[in-house]
Structures are given as structure tokens and as C-alpha cells.
Image (cartoon, coloured by chain):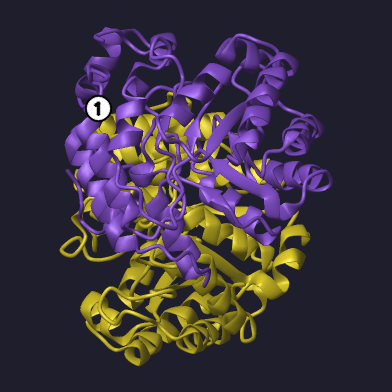
Amino acid sequence: MGNVPTAVKHCLSYEQLIQDYPWLKRLLLEEKEIVPTGVKIQLIDMLSGTGLPVIEATSFVSSKWVPQMADHTDVLRGIHREPHVRYPVLTPNLQGFHDAVAAGATEVAVFGSASETFSKKNINCSIDESMLRFEEVIKAAKERQIPVRGYVSCALGCPYEGHIEPSKVSEVAKRLYEMGCYEISLGDTIGVGTPGSMFKMLQSVMAEVPTNALAVHCHDTYGQALPNILIALQMGVCVVDSAVAGLGGCPYAQGSSGNVSTEDVLYMLHGVGVETGVNLAKVLEAGDFICEALGRQTNSRVARARGRTL
Amino acid sequence: LFNMSAVAGLRAGRTLPDKVKIVEVGPRDGLQNEKTIVPTETKIHLIDMLSASGLSVIEATSFVSPKWVPQMADQVEVMKGIDRKPGVSYPVLTPNLKGFQAAVKAGASEVAIFGAASELFSKKNINCSVEESLQRFDEVVRMAKEAGVRVRGYVSCVLGCPYEGNVAPEKVAHVAKRLYSMGCYEISLGDTTGVGTPGSMSDMLEAVSREVPVNALAVHCHDTYGQALANILVALQMGISVIDSSVAGLGGCPYASGASGNVATEDVVYMLHGLGIQTGVDLSKLMDAGAFICRTLNRRTSSKVAQATCKL
């Protein structure tokens, strides 16, 4: 891509930056390569052998918007479907849903937002309009007995609007749940949340949606993911989203981390005596594999501490 | 469901402390574990910037022999060169009587001593058993009392030891109690290798708080396994209101090459402010200090808040 990330541009001139921080050069000039289908399939197959019960396999969005997911059909058809493991896929609209079913999907996910601005900028429509779209998907899914998971993004803050009222989050969560989503994943999209805001948001949502239908999807952009997950667990939430090796940077703060790493979450959960059924060593192996394939360092501190650097 | 579930609901809503005192260990613990030797003027400037950020305790240097810790060879110049902000404390490490005397001569008004909850670690690190080290410290504490100098006690390996593995909470409580009874005003409990989780942290704190009042306790968490902030949260829930941290997360882990060490002060402050807890720290000024020292060391900050805010 060769261009300087916007966030960095606003801080200092590129030349000054490279002069002051020579190690940055490699980071800034990194190309975003498309991951080969075979690598994706191998990653998913490795994850299937770790004990993870749910692995989000791909996304049936238009390849125009998300080129990385253009091979969605090949991936879904190519993976080894481990019994007792579910492989949900993203379906933003009815078209995507039909493509997903044709490719063999048995669970889908829809992505709502607690922020109007984010909804408009991200999926080009208001929250209300998006709900109408999702209603179509959920209706079609119900007819085929396909479970639907609902995501609410910007649950603890929005890159455009800033603060998000907990009541807005619970309103959107409630709508998705009442429409028929079996589980609602509450996402701290830009990782700005802290245990303080997590607590307030969950209190609000738990008044509208049963706790056992809730999940948290924390980003670690500000290092807050694990304490945020901990407080969610203390409040009774028992579904946690995470990404092996902490894959997926934060698109709103270049160079920052995004998803919390599965390895670090598992380390904490096992340390507090929670049973996950997941083998941490095998997840570490999957993390090693994908990092080597991508030519990048893991974001997992557990992985790094065990000397698995690249 | 898990060992905290019995009090989980209670904990989540339990009142946290209104205020937390942050003990900034970057200039000592942080720099001591950085490979690059930092010029004296840089150390002084860093400490002065930290003083300006609102921190009330800044560990300035260490009076160990420069033979063992060359990074701290300029201990006297640093002590004499920094701008001592009123209301801010500048403790220094003093492993023995000789170090203590040198520290007082250089103007120190607070010192710190370092015990271990693990026998093997004590022997490998300071060449004597835990009991022998406590006797050494007893001398320092007695002299300090006479000189009107406050002493802070550290206990390392409280949640695990790189040599022994598991460390019994009762052992930690025993060492903490000894240090407290000797006269240390505060005991900082250190997860030296960062292996602890909220589970082991709460077990350990339960044992220690039976022997030492909780308002005399602090936690010193390492982020080697990414658990530091979660561990700190649990400590806060159990009444701890003193947190050690290091600007920019300076100081790698000497036991796991390439791994992180100290938890970053910026990330701790971000969490505390998000919880509505007062620290007296101006996060923006703190990040300036972090950016300054990282530029000098030519390394990337370990603070995620700093990375996200483009203060590299």
C-alpha cells in the first residue's frame, strides 16, 4: 500500500517519524496481503482440533467491500467440519444468506450497531434500516432452522460519536434478541471500554436480554480487554469472543492491536478455574502457524512469553 | 462455576477505592531491566517529567553496587540532580546497610528493601536464604527508624517463581508479615514473572490480608502473560489501593526473552480513570514522559494506550 496510515499522518511528518523511530519503517510499509484459501482452511482445521466449540469461518459479504473474504464458498466447502463444533458465517443481507446456505452454512451472524453514525459509515444505512435487513435474514433462517447470532458493535464507544449510552446498546440488543437471534455479542469495537463502562453497559443490557444469551467481544486496543472480560464473567456472562494470536488490528488506530487473543483469554480463564474444554497448547500451535504464514508477530502475550516469537 | 463465583456477583458491584496511589517504578525497575545504558541527564529529565505528571511516588534509583547493576551506577548524581517536587516521594532501593548509608548521604528520605517468597529465587538473586535476607533488612529498617527514613518492603515471586514454580500463599503472607512487623510502612507484592491470574491473585491476597492490614498493601504486577490489568482489577476489588507500574511498560522480563515485564502506567491509569478512581495523574503528561524515554531508548512503548494514541 505504501501510504502512511492516517492516524500517524496527523501526529508527525513521515520523515520525522522514520528519523525518530527507525524500527517503524517495516511496519508502515507492510502490504496487506490476501491470505491464500489453503492457509485459511488449514487454520480453521487446526482450530477445530483444539476443543473450541465455535469457529467463525468466513463472511458472505460482497468481495467488493471485503476482498479478503472473496473465497468464502471455497473456505466453507474446504474445511473439515468437526462434529460438536459450529462454524457460523457473517451474512449482512438476504443475498449473503442465500449464498451462505448454498455453500453449506448451518449458522449465520448479523451485525448491528449501537451507533447511528457507525452504522451509516460501515454498512451505509441507519440502525432501523439495518434491522429491517436483518429481519429478512432471520425470517429466512428460521424457515431453515438455522440459528442466528446478533452482534452489536460500538457497545462501549464509537470512533465517530464517542460516548454511547448503555440504553442505546440495550435497545439494539433487545431488538435483535426479540427478532430471533439466539445470542447477542456485545462488541467494544475500538477497545475504549474499561471495567467501569462494561459494568454499566451490561447492567443495562441484562435488564432486557437474559444473561445466558449474552456474549462479550472485547478489543484490546487500550489493553483493557482482559479486565473487561473478567468483570463480564463476574456478572454472569459466559460466552467470550476472541481471536487466535490476536489477529486483526484496529482499523481506527493504525498499528494498534484489535481483537483480544484467544491464548491470553484461555490463560486467564483456566487460571480462575473456568472450564473451557479448550487445549491451550493446540491453540498456541494454530497461532504459530498463522503468524508464520502471515509473516507477522503474534499479539498474544502468552505466546510471546513461551518464546514463540518470529 | 469457578472459584470466584461465590463472591462474583458481590465483587462486580463492590465499591472500589475512591483514590489509588500509583508507585512509578520506571526510572528504577524499568530502566534497570533495559539493555541500553541511559545517560544520567536522560534519567533526570525522565524523573522530572514524571514529577510534572502528578505522580506522587517515583522510584528514582537503586543503591546497589554498580558492579551488579551498571545501569544504576550514577545513583548519587541522579538523586542530587532531580528536581524534588514538594509532596512527591522519591524512594530508592537499598539492599543492605552500606547501600542505605550511601542513599541517606545522597539525600534519600525513603528507601525500599526487596524480599522474596521463594527460597530458590532469594538464593539465586541475592545469594542468601529468605531468613538471612530478612535479618539483613532488619538492620536497614532499624537504622532507617533512627534516621527518620520510611521503608517500603517488596516481596517478589508472590504468584509463582521461575525456579520453584508454585508459591504457597502462606509463604507470601509469612514474609509480608515479617517485613511489616519489622517496620516497613507498606508491602508491595510482586508477581515477578507475570504468571499470576485473578484466581491466584485473590487466593494470595486473602492469605496476606489476614496478616497485614490491606491499606498497607500494594500490588506490583508484571504483564508477561497479559494478566496484569485483570490481576490489578481483582486486587482493587479486594481493597488494595496502591498500584506499582512503569511508564511505557519499561523493563522487559529477564526470565522470558522477548516477553514484556512491568505493566504500563498509562494503561493502569486509563483503567483507573475509566473506573472513576482518582489518581492525581495527568495521562497526557504521563504519555509525554513515555514517548520521551522510548525515543531515547529507541524502542517501542509497551503501553497499549500509548500505541493507540499514537504516542509511540
Residue sitting at x 32%, y 10%: A4
Q: Nearer the viewer, residue A202 or B66?
A: A202
A290 vs A229, left or right, is left
Judge whether residue B74 can be spotted in this image.
Answer: no
Chain where mark 1 sits: A
The chain coloured purple in the image: A
- The amino acid marked with disc number 1 is Val
Q: Which residue is mark 1?
A: A35
Q: Secondary structure at mark 1?
A: loop
Q: Is residue A230 left or right of residue A303?
A: right
Say whether residue B171 is visible: yes
Image: B57 above or below A189: below
Q: Residue at x 71, y 58 (%)?
A: A235
Q: Position of residue A70 (x, y in %)?
A: 34, 19
Question: Quick one: which chain is yellow?
Answer: B
Quadrant where the image shows the N terminus of chain B: bottom right
Looking at the rendered structure, the number of numbered marks drawn on it comes to 1
Name the image quarter holding residue B294: top left
Question: Quadrant where the C terminus of chain B lies?
Answer: top left
Q: Residues within 10 Å of mark 1 (few under 14, many from 20)?
A: some
Is A185 in front, or is B281?
A185
Front residue of B81/B270: it is B270
Residue nearest the observer in this picture, B202 or B124 = B202
For the point 29% across and 81% down, the residue is B122
Which residue is drawn at the image coordinates 51% and 43% (left, top)?
A: B267
Residue B112 place in picture, x, y as percent: 44, 68
Pinpoint residue B151: horizontal percent, then vertical percent: 51, 71
Q: Is residue B264 above or below residue B232?
A: above
